[in-house]
Amino acid sequence: MTTRSEAVETPCPYLGTGYDPRSAAGRLESLTDREREVLLLLGTGLGNRQLAQELGIADRTVKAHIANIVCKIGQETRTQAAIVSALAHDVLCDDPSCTRHQVAASDRHRGSAVA
Ligand SMILES: [Zn+2]
């Protein structure tokens, strides 16, 4: 029978990749205001068509923004950029009433060594 302490010793496959999407957070300052907005929306998991509707721009403009963002923050795919967005929401989002900030604040408190 497997005990709980044995289960905890299983190496985390996430850490095994040597890749940490949080490392991209330091590159977010290179983004324009519009790119930050696109990246925030990308973190919701919406597709290009829905992003275009939200932003009131053409699909191809969304694609161009995302290509620039992926490059600027040192990622290879939009999926990686979306993960960065989700993890760095509190860095990207300026809205003090955003409910995601309250969640992020408690995360930040727990993981203060990360920054
Ligand atoms: Zn927010």
Image (tube, rainbow, N blue to C red):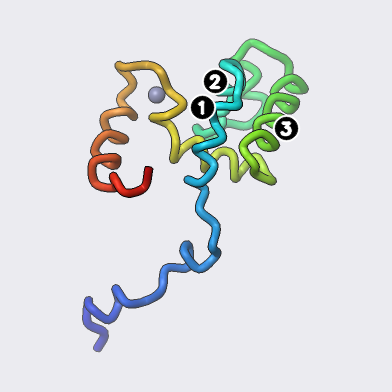
Q: Residue at x 50, y 53 (%)?
A: 20
Q: Tell whether 67 sits left or right of 87.
A: right
Amino acid found under the numbered disc labelled 3? Ala
The image shows residue 2, relative to residue 50, as above or below, that is below
Q: Residue furthest bottom?
A: 1
Characterize the local packing of mark 3: few (<14), some (14-19) or many (20 or more) Cα atoms within 10 angstroms: some
Q: Residue at x 68, y 13 (%)?
A: 57
Characterize the local packing of mark 1: few (<14), some (14-19) or many (20 or more) Cα atoms within 10 angstroms: many
Amino acid found under the numbered disc labelled 2? Glu
Q: Tell whether 7 sits left or right of 56.
A: left
Where does residue 84 sit, x and y in percent of width and height?
A: 52, 40
Q: Secondary structure at mark 1?
A: helix
Residue 4 is marked as none
Is residue 79 something that shows in the picture? yes
Q: Earlier in the sequence, mark 2 or mark 3?
A: 2
Give the labeled residue for mark 1: 40
How far apart are the two marked residues, 3 and 1, measured between alpha carbons? 15 Å
The image shows residue 89, relative to residue 76, as above or below, that is above
Q: Secondary structure at mark 2?
A: helix
Q: Earlier in the sequence, mark 3 or mark 1?
A: 1
State which quadrant residue 5 falls in: bottom left
Q: Residue furthest right?
A: 60
Residue contact between numbered discs 2 and 3, judged by CB atoms under 8 Å = no
Q: Is label 1 within 8 A of ligand 1 (CB to nearest ligand atom)?
A: yes
Give the labeled residue for mark 2: 37
Q: If the image is split into quadrants, where does the N terminus sit?
A: bottom left
